[in-house]
Amino acid sequence: MSIVLDNVTFRYSTRTAPVIDGASLVLQRGESCALMGPSGEGKSTLLYLIAGLLIPESGVVRVEPTDPQDEANTSTAWVFQSPTLLTRRTALDNVSLALLASGAHRATAEPIAEEALRAVGLHAFLHYPVRRLSGGQAQRVALARAMVCNPALVLADEPTANLDFETGRAVIEVLLDVMSCAAVLVATHDLRIAKMMDKVAYLEGGKLEVHST
């Protein structure tokens, strides 16, 4: 799996200047990249372009398989700043449902979901309704749900914003370890989190600058 942005430009109809202006980026399978920049500069817009939820005004966005294994797994997992969970269901239910929706049987889904929750430090909260969890705990449920279906591409929009640094660092370490065969793009304002990635892409004034860490 590789992400290729080639001279991509995008503007909203309500704005004269482009939000994304000639952005280029290559992110290969197994690589991670932090997407940084001031608030309101278009980080979420760039994620939506990569996911195909927005169409660029010009340039090319490609998310493509690079080997036969990728052909069998081109799924994308999203993790948002505010987790979208079923608050009356348990943490285990929320993660298991992602597997059930992909065709897994409950007998196999629950042990896999339990292991994912253990990996993000929530084994003691398997049977807690999400509404009883803290914001940080709920975000970790969302991360476990993203991990559990083994996606080829992970797009994370401020996934540690509601976590203290140590918890956020631990969660990102788990995410990068479990998703070591995926392409991972994480929007963040935290330079300490960004330094954990292979690359940093900085977006400001529509321009994207990419550097290795």
Image (cartoon, grey):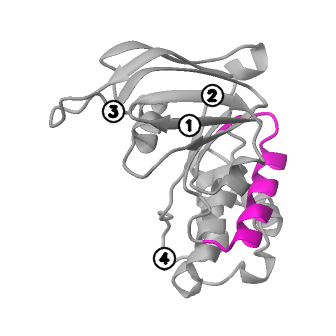
Residue at the image point whose x is 42% and y is 28% from the top: 52
Q: Earlier in the sequence, mark 4 or mark 2?
A: 4
Badge 3 element:
loop
Residues drawn in magenta: 163-184
Badge 2 element:
strand
Q: In the rendered image of this protein, does residue 158 appear above or below residue 10?
A: below
On the question of residue 111 being in view, the answer is no
Q: Looking at the picture, how far across and down is residue 157, in whole percent?
A: 52, 51
Residue at the image point whose x is 75% and y is 47% from the top: 195
Question: Foreground: 141 or 189?
Answer: 189
Residue bearing mark 4: 87
Q: In the rendered image of this protein, does residue 170 appear above or below residue 177?
A: below
Label 3, residues with CA under 10 Å away: few <14, some 14-19, many ≥20:
many
CA gap, disc 4 and disc 2: 38 Å
Q: Looking at the picture, how far across and down is residue 38, in whole percent?
A: 46, 49
Q: Which mark is residue 202?
A: 1
Identify the image quadrant of residue 72.
top right
User: Majority secondary structure of the magenta segment?
Assistant: helix
Q: Earlier in the sequence, mark 3 or mark 1?
A: 3
Residue bearing mark 3: 19
Question: Foreground: 139 or 213?
Answer: 213
Identify the image quadrant of residue 41.
top left
Do tag 2 and tag 1 residues touch (Cβ < 8 Å)? yes
